[in-house]
Amino acid sequence: MRRFTLFVLACLVSVFAWPKVGSVAGPRPEGIEVVRDEASFGAKGELTTVDFENLPADASSCPVIPLQERIDNPLVQDGVVFNDPYCLTTGYCSSPTCPTANIVLSLNQGATITLPSRNRGVLVQIEGIGDVPFVLEVEDRVGRTVSVEETGILFGTLVLGFRSAPGIAQIRVARVGPTPPDCPVAPCGPLVLSRLSFESR
């Protein structure tokens, strides 16, 4: 009788413990997906594109040239916040450096891009940096992070996309360079952004 009672108690313990075991062993939420072209991004919702054509072609948040126009730092464009620890600058990138001549925004190492809360993912388009390597740190809205190392395309456009079910919160320019022998230690110039698109929920 005592053995039977112990057996019943053991069965009850295992039954009550099962939901806990299941929650631990169950599938974890997906992380941040990295895509490297617009087709793979596969936006299903509304896509908002932010470019810098409405900004002066030669401006800075801390102008040093007489009569140079000033832009804000942080800079807000369509709900996206660009923040630089030094100075945000714009410039005109002509062809063939940028395949489609346009106004670009330069982000120094340590700069951040903060996205609106209700998004499914973001695409960034990088031009005009040649074949300089760089690292982006991406954080989603539940605190998961991914570090992505890439290299710019000489006379071309690099597209990087980031998707997460809770949405992307922020992108940080973690490193630009090095590019020996001209710049053996990062940072080696700014990261140049020609446009950004985010998918709304």
Image (cartoon, helix red, strand yellow):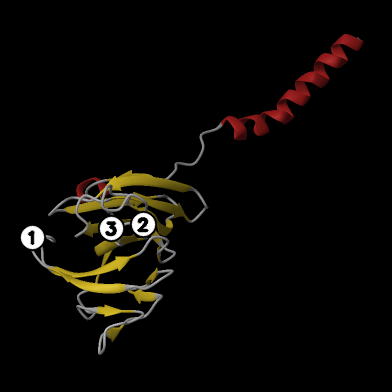
Q: Residue at x 40, y 69 (%)?
A: 84
Res. 99 in view: yes
Q: Is residue 18 above or below residue 124?
A: above
- Image coords of residue 31 (percent x, y): 44, 43
| Residue 91 in which image quadrant | bottom left
Residue 46 appears in the picture as rendered: no
Image coords of residue 97 (percent x, y): 12, 60
Q: Nearer the viewer, mark 1 or mark 3?
A: 1
| Residue drawn at (51%, 37%) of the image | 28
> In the rendered structure, which amino acid carries the disc numbered 3?
Val
Question: Which residue has dot 3 on it?
Answer: 124
**Nearer-N-terminus badge (1/3):** 1
For mark 1, give the secondary structure: loop
Say if 55 sits above or below 35 in the image: below
Look at mark 1 in the image and give the residue it sits on: 96
Q: Is residue 9 above or below residue 90?
A: above
Say whether disc 3 or disc 2 marks the residue closer to the N-terminus: 3
* Crowd rating for badge 3 (residues with CA inside 10 Å; few <14, some 14–19, many 20+): many
Tell me which amino acid carries mark 2: Pro
Q: Earlier in the sequence, mark 2 or mark 1?
A: 1
> Which residue, given by chain and number where applicable, does mark 2 sit on?
187
At label 1, the amino acid type is Pro
Drawn side of residue 60 relative to residue 171, left or right: left
Which quarter of the image is occupied by the C terminus? bottom left
